[in-house]
Amino acid sequence: MIDFKQLAQQYKSELLDKVVPFWLDYSIDRECGGYYTCLERDGSVFDTDKFVWLQGREVWMLATLYNKVEQRQEWLEAAIHGAEFLKQHGHDSNLNWYFAFDREGHPLVEPYNIFSYTFAVIAFGQLYLATGNEEYKDISRHTFDIVLSKVDNPKGRWNKAAQGARALKSFALPMILCNVALEIEPLLEPAFMEKTIRTCIHEVMDVFYRPEVGPKGLIVEHLGTNNELVDCMDGRLLNPGHAIEAMWFIMDLGKRLGDQQLIERACQIALQEAEYGWDEQYGGIFYFMDRKGHPLQQLEWDQKLWWVHLETLITMLKGYQLTGNEECLRWFERVHDYTWSHFTDPEHPEWFGYLNRQGERLLTLKGGKWKGCFHVPRGLMNVWRMLDEIANREA
């Protein structure tokens, strides 16, 4: 029997006493602005390049802590610190957001990546809610407009596909827009918000979810432009963690809409994804899979990644919280046990990110080009708050 109150304290303590202080102590570049994210296990900096994804995510995380947990001035100041660096260096004069820059803010990689834009949207949107600064609101809203304008060709002129080549659409964009729309709802007109939500839900649940894939139905990563399954390596690709993460976004939208049927369906899909993606031999959830069981082009396909397991913790607990489904709770316990025994570091704060299939640590870093102040603190915060709510409800 889970002691929800005790478990809530475990997640809260890990967040507030270890993980957030780690990023405040080691990531803030007080000379040049912004954040270091390439951090060794002890917090030492091993590379000073900066990435818009992770700059935006850290701004969002710190502003969210300020808005939803406690109005600590140090969190707000650290969020503004990152946002001002992004505002000055992260984009061209038209809010086209670069992918990477050097320590001083000189661009290194052109704005080819749509997710640089989406994380800028939620960063400045959340910081606007914390500060009331209209400039932050304008940046968020105008960047969101650009995101929507790029849906049909996210990479724009940086698209490498040959003219007339096989065209594929990606699950990643409608999936992230489910979350982005809710994040900046106070900035959007109600009718526009409603339309955006309905479009995102349709794409995720009726287009990319394929009842004919796998034993019970799964979400695929890519489809043809006519929403058809495509038999190529990208067309067969599955990413269980991505699909599971999307289901807690959908559950949040279901809650927002008062649609219990949508919540129940998202919960069931999440369970199907976890069952399909779980490594029965070594434990943990595979990173990539092929829907026909063919070899994968991604050499890291069998690695166990931090974000996959943290997102699964959020999804399964949310499924239990919103539906009472005991199978979700059993999966939460299973993934909790694996996650805390494999990704936590007994010697230093923050969590490891990359394990091999057997669950052995591949890299000692706590932050890099893809791992920053986001999935670990977001996961801990969400799980703590849900556990607390469940404990209070059941009491």
Image (tube, rainbow, N blue to C red):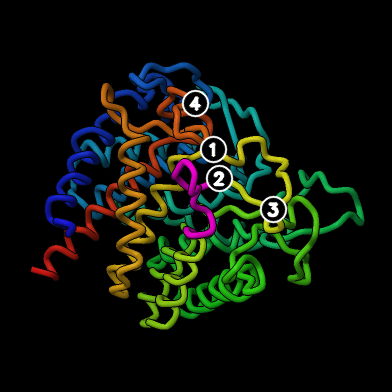
Q: Which residue is mark 1?
A: 303
Instruction: Specify whether residue 391 is painted magenta.
Output: no
Residue 277 magenta: yes
The dot on residue 362 is 4
User: Considering only order in the chain, which callout, 2 or 3, is on the residue closer to the N terminus?
Assistant: 2
Q: How far apart are labels 1 and 2 at the CA level?
A: 6 Å
Instruction: Measure the C-alpha gap from mark 1 to mark 3.
Output: 17 Å
Along the line of sight, the residue nearer the viewer: 177 or 204: 204
Q: Amino acid at mark 4?
A: Leu
Q: Main secondary structure of the magenta part?
A: loop
Residue at the location (56% across, 23% down)? 102
Question: Which label lies toward us, 1 or 3?
Answer: 3
Q: CA distance from mark 1 to mark 4?
A: 9 Å
Q: Nearer the viewer, residue 203 or 140?
A: 203
Q: Nearer the viewer, mark 3 or mark 2?
A: 3
Query: Are discs 1 and 4 less than 8 Å apart at CB?
Result: yes
